[in-house]
Structure formats: C-alpha cells, structure tokens
Image: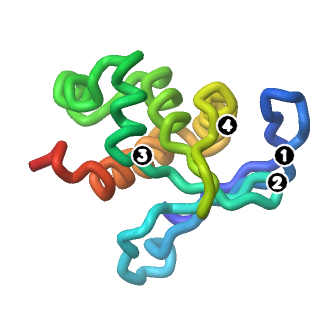
Amino acid sequence: MGLFTRENVEDENEEIIEETEIEDDAADDQPVEDGPVTFEVGGRVYEIRYPQKRLDLYESGHKPVMATFVQNGGAFSRKELRDLTAYGLKVKGGGFVSPKQGMVMADKLIEENGYATVLEVVAEALQRDCGFLFK
C-alpha cells in the first residue's frame, strides 16, 4: 500500500484540514506490524480500529459486515465502505470520531486515495481486530 496522502480536506465545519497521511511498513519491504495503519489530519494521528462494541454499533444500522463480505466476494459498496471506515476512525490513544464526522473524513479518503486503497486498510483492520469473523 505504501503512502496514503491528501491535502486541503474540509471537515464538517468547513475548516481546512492541512494534511492526511497513511503509512505502513509494506512500502519499505519490511514485515507489516500487527498494529493499525495510522494517518494524520490537522496534527492529530488517527487509526482504524474495530472493537466488538464498535462493530455492533455499525451493524445496528447497517447490513452485517460478513453478510456483505460474503455476498459481494470480499467487497463493499462505496457507501458501505465509507460508513464502515467512519465507524472505525479513532484518535490514536483517544476516542472514536463521531460517525457523522467520520463519514466526511472517509469520503475524502476514498476520493483522494481510491476505493481499493481504503478497502485494503479496512479489510486489514477487520482481520486484525475481528479475526473471529474469518475463522
């Protein structure tokens, strides 16, 4: 995956977020760590995490993740990917981003970096945090 960047992203309050970066060790041909991919927005570091309660919250208003995953051969619709990304966005070392703000951020991530790149990050997070879904 390598480097995942975008500039001048607007949040829901119309403020400009200077820069976003998502990096992992794969670009350096080093083993990928078990931890989440991180990225920076406006000086804050974010990650994508799916603890059971967060996944339950997502599924309370959406189709179950595995139902979509199986039905679509491991893919999600663009809206599902946006929403799933939004529910997993967390300030590193802090709390989760509100789903509403997360959807704005996720839309920009998909626009600037492409569906496939964001899908890869989300799929890695689901496998890492919810491995029980894939056993």
Whether tag 1 and tag 3 are in contact, CB under 8 A, the answer is no
Residue 59 percent across, percent down from the top left: 34, 24
- The residue lying at 46 percent from left, 62 percent from top is 36
**Between discs 3 and 2, the one toward the N terminus:** 2
Dot 1 corresponds to which residue? 17
Residue 14 percent across, percent down from the top left: 89, 29
Label 1 and label 2: CA atoms lie apart by 5 Å
User: Counting other residues with Cα less than 10 Å from the Cα at mark 4, is it few (<14), some (14-19), or many (20 or more)?
Assistant: many
**Between discs 1 and 4, the one toward the N terminus:** 1
Q: Secondary structure at mark 2?
A: loop
- The residue lying at 80 percent from left, 49 percent from top is 7
In the image, 52 versus 19, the foreground residue is 52
Dot 4 corresponds to which residue? 105
Dot 3 corresponds to which residue? 122
Considering only vertical position in the picture, is 3 above or below 28? above
Whether tag 1 and tag 4 are in contact, CB under 8 A, the answer is no
Q: Amino acid at mark 3?
A: Val
Q: Secondary structure at mark 1?
A: strand
126 vs 10, left or right, is left
Q: Amino acid at mark 2?
A: Gly
Whether tag 1 and tag 2 are in contact, CB under 8 A, the answer is yes
**Between discs 4 and 2, the one toward the N terminus:** 2
Asked if residue 52 can be seen in this view, the reply is yes
**Between discs 4 and 3, the one toward the N terminus:** 4
Asked if residue 111 can be seen in this view, the reply is no
- The residue lying at 86 percent from left, 28 percent from top is 13
Dot 2 corresponds to which residue? 42
Label 1 and label 3: CA atoms lie apart by 22 Å
Q: Quadrant of residue 97?
A: top right
Label 1 and label 4: CA atoms lie apart by 10 Å
Disc tally is: 4
